[in-house]
Amino acid sequence: MNGQITAGELINPEKCYLSAAVDMEAAENFIQQAMDMIIQEAVKKGTNVKEKVCEWRSPEQLKELLDLELKDTGESESKILQCCKDAIRYSVKTSHPRFFNQLFAGMEPHSMVASFITEAIKTSLYTYEVAPVFTLMEDVVLRTMIELIGWEDGGDGLFNPGGSMSNMYAVNLARYSYCPDFKENGIYSSSRLVMLTSQEAHYSISKAAALLGLGTKNVYVVPSDYRGKMIPSALEEKIQLAKSEGAVPFFVNVTAGTTVFGAFDPIEEIADICEKHNLWLHVDACWGGGALMSKKHKHLLNGIQRVNSVAWNLHKMLMATLQCSAFLVRDKT
Ligand code: PLP
């Protein structure tokens, strides 16, 4: 048809236009060179204590140093490799031993190779058909995490793009459990719902209130003690306050490993209060969940088997590559 390739011809294996577009030998060569460079610059230098965490430059300087303009013409492979090298050079190496900003410092080679594999085969999480191996793998990992949490009747879970998302899922499920009509009727069918969390909690809890339409003013902040742990009697007071205002408290977030202090809220005592008032108890164990793997430190999360849901980031204390974030829920329905 007018000398053009039809869609049918494009995917016809006999004609193989799509794969012909990639010269496999050249591709392999390029990938090999890139991998050597990545190991040298990102892995070896990026984790070497004698190297810098980052060669810091201002935005103006960086724009001068890097060739960031998109062009209509292509570039040679040597130029592309140089650009990749520069991208690594001027980036913050978060696996460097002296990187102390976010909570995910440290390189874990096996996890990194696993990430390379998922990138190389461009896998997807949708269904068993498209990701048979990873679907089974996910199931085993989630089941093991559920065992570590100690939910004797099991539970369910999924991996998602970060701990903030896990915390939001928890609020959404708790709200659904309290007001099943919410899904169809929206905010118009419910009373004023109140969430409770400590002053040290991660900001994703109030972000969830904003995104889910509950409103940040309906997040009641419970004071913490001098070590950053939620004070259970103060939680009880805030619940009473919400009830006296005619509002409906429905969700309590405890943090196992607060972002700034690394404090662990007392789960057992808070679970008693939640049971008494019939509140959904969620634990944000994004950072501190890793302590469940330690015989010495797991007592910090005593009582976690009593909570309704857990957010646990394996990319933080357990050093998986970003993002590896699980949301787990006790109610399998
Ligand atoms: N919860 C806690 C306690 C955190 O420290 C963090 C991030 O540092 C999060 C939640 C958010 O996790 P993410 O960055 O994966 O969204």
Image: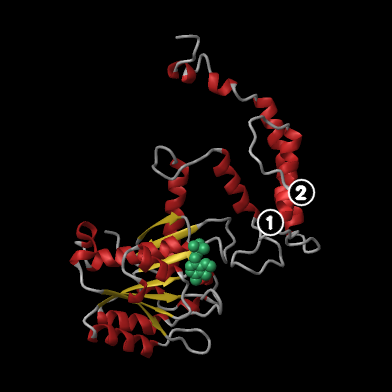
Please identify the quarter of the rendering in which residue 196 is found.
Answer: bottom left
Question: What residue lies at 31% left-to-right and 63% top-to-bottom?
Answer: 173
Is residue 265 visible to the viewer in this orientation of the structure?
yes
Say which of marks 2 and 1 sits in front: 1
Which residue is labeled 2 in the image? 40
State the SS at label 2.
Answer: helix
Q: Earlier in the sequence, mark 2 or mark 1?
A: 2
Q: Is residue 64 above or below residue 247?
A: above
**Residue at image x 47%, y 9%?**
2
What's the residue at 44%, 19% (across, down)?
Answer: 7
Q: Is residue 299 left or right of residue 22?
A: left
Residue 59's label in the rendered image is 1
Q: Is residue 171 above or below residue 114?
A: below
- Depth check, front residue: 147 or 6: 6
Amino acid at dot 1: Pro
**Is 177 on the left-hand or right-hand side of 135?**
left
Left-right relation of 295 to 331: right
